[in-house]
Every structure is written in C-alpha cells, then in structure tokens.
Image (tube, helix red, strand yellow):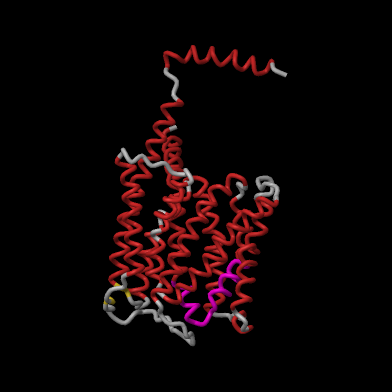
Amino acid sequence: MAGEGFRGRILGKFQQLKPHILMVLAQLAYTFLYIVTQASFNHGMNPHVYVTYRHIVAGFVFLPFAYFLERTKRPKMTLAIFLEIFVLSLLGVSLTLNMYFVSLNYTSPTFIASVVNAMAAITFVMAIVLRLEVVDIRSPRGIAKVLGTLVSLAGMMIMTLYKGPVLKNLGHPPISISKGNTTIQENWVKGSVLTVASCISWSIWFIMQAFALRRYPAQLSLTTWMSLVGAAQSAAYTVIVQHKKAAWTIGFNIDLWSTIYGGVVISGIVVYVQLWCTEQKGPVFVTMFNPLSTILVAVLSYFVLGEKLYTGSIIGAVIVIVGLYLLLWGKEHDQEAEMKVKEQSEEIPAENYGDSKRQLIPDLNVGTAEP
C-alpha cells in the first residue's frame, strides 16, 4: 500500500509537470533548429523552398498517424473549420516562417532567439484583449504581469534598435559554418523588422489555436492539416518569387537533413506538443519558455560556432528575460489562486452534507419525471 501511494504521488507530480517538461524539450529542439537551418542557408538553401519542403515532409509523415489515431476523435470537416485552418496555416506556417527564416539571413540565430522572447508579452496583451487572461491591477500578481509585459517589450525594442559593440571571441571555434556561395549580407534593420513582424504573426497564431482547439479538438490532425495547407501556400508564394529551377533541387547534404529535421521534429512533433500544451495551459504558457532556447543558442553560437555576439543583444535579452519571468510569476500565482477558489467552491461542509444529499434526490426525480 505504501509503495502504491508513493508511486501514485510520483505519477501525480509527473502529470502536473508534464506540460513544463514537454515545453523544455521543445525549446531544446528549437535550439538545434537555429543552428542547422543557418548552416543550410549558408550552404545555399533558399528559405522559401525550405519552408515548403519542410511542411510537405511534416504533412505526409504525420498523415497516417492522424488518420488512424484520431479517427473517432476528429470532428467532421466543414467549410468554416477549413477556412479557420487556412488562416492558421497562413499565420503559423507560410507567412510567419517565410519572414522568420529570411530574417535569419540578415541577422543571427542569437538575435532571433532573443527577440522571440517578447512573443510571450505580445501574446499576453492579445489574450487580455480577447479575455483569455484576466489581470487584477490591485493585486501584486496583476501588477507583476503588467510590469513584466512592459519590461519584455522594452527589451525587445533594445535588441531591435541597438546593436552595440561586438564581443571578442575567446578562440577558434570548434565548428565552422562556411558561407558557401551565398550572396546575402547582414542587414540588421531589415532583419529586425522581419523578425518582429513574424513574432506578432506568431502570437496571433497561438491565440487562434486556443479557439480552434475548442471546435477541432484533435491536435495531431490539426498539426497535419496546418502542415499540408501551409506547404501549399508557401509553394504558391515561392513559385512567384523564385524562378530558378535549381533552387528546388537539394542533394544528400545539410539541406536534406535540415528539411527532414524541421519537418518531422519541429513542424510535426513540436507543433503537436505546443497544441497539447495550449489546450492544457493556454497560449501564454507555451510562449513563456522561449528564453531557454535564447540562452542555449547564444552559448552554442558564440562558443561552438564562433558567431558574433553584440552587447545590444545581451542587454536586451537580459531585460526581456527579467520581464518574462515577472509575467510568469504573476501567471503561475494566478493559477494557484484559481485552483484554491475552485477547490473551495466544490467543498461541501460536513454539517451540511446530509441536507445537500437530501436536496439532490428530489431534483433528480423531477428531472426523470419530465417527458
């Protein structure tokens, strides 16, 4: 009995921390994505072609799993649901990722990972407007959430507008990513605008997921639909902007591996995990874990790849992380308060238990007597 009780407590704690563990693993996956995609783009891979191929891979790999595993859970497809999926695919795949990966050519993985931290603050503001989040400015928790949002946005502005001096590398990096034959050069302003625009679009996507999952509560099927529809949208755009047939040809090299990794791991597994966590904890919770990938990307890029690291990115990232965890503190304590209120409302005082029980019986009888 004691062993079963201990095992039950362990399983209960795991279920409580399951969304947190999954989001940490998702950020680890994103960290590796920044590195392999930049290596692929430097090798000559076209970002628009990459987005298209990546989601074709994701869609066809997860199609059989979605079809068989969610056959009874998946709602019937209607025109309204398909249009909603079309908009979700536009915001979360074709529009956002095309801007996002083009900006990677103009800035750096460290900068992009840092700016993405502000997505939690942007998502939080949108959630308040749409009443998915509640803020009580009379309580310390509410003040922390508002202050954290403002601080995060200030940090994002610093990263966007201030580059600052570059930090000197400590030595020769163990791994060197060759620039290959690419002709794209750094354009910090253009890259910054594209990064911020993609973050805003991504925040809208996370908010829309919370509403879409209420009408289409099949995460795996929704992931597959977004991949396939997003791949078609991206392909239509890429055909317009990229006329060279050679850009669509990839060999058995880093381009292929980055496409497979991005399709299977990121657009498939990670998006599915984010949808599940959004349904369990809400869209703001999902975006709160971005600072983890910022730290990991900065460490890998600076120490392992020898990438330039600017003081503006460091200062802005620190400010964003401080603001973000003010927001996290406020939100987590809000959830604890909500759970206590819910538990108190569900409790029936012992002295009133008999009266409550007697009151339920005639109600049930009346219900069954009605035609």
> Which residue in the rendered view is the most extreme toward the bottom?
181
Between 327 and 196, which is closer to the camera in this rendering? 196
In the rendered image, residue 169, in percent from the top left (x then y), is placed at: 28, 78
Magenta-highlighted residues: 35-57
Quadrant of the image for the N terminus?
Answer: top left
Q: Quadrant of residue 229?
A: bottom right
* Residue at the extreme front: 129
Looking at the picture, how far across and down is residue 262, in whole percent? Answer: 53, 67
Residue drawn at x 55%, y 66% is: 95
Where residue 330 sits: x, y (%)?
34, 45
State which quadrant residue 240 falls in. bottom right
Q: Which residue in the rendered view is the most extreme toward the right?
A: 371
In the picture, the quarter occupied by the C terminus is top right
Q: Could you tell me residue 133's position as x and y percent? A: 44, 44
> What is the magenta segment's predominant secondary structure?
helix
Q: Is residue 129 magenta?
A: no
Residue 55 within the magenta-colored segment of the rendering: yes
Which residue: 45% across, 76% down? Answer: 105
Give the mark count: 0
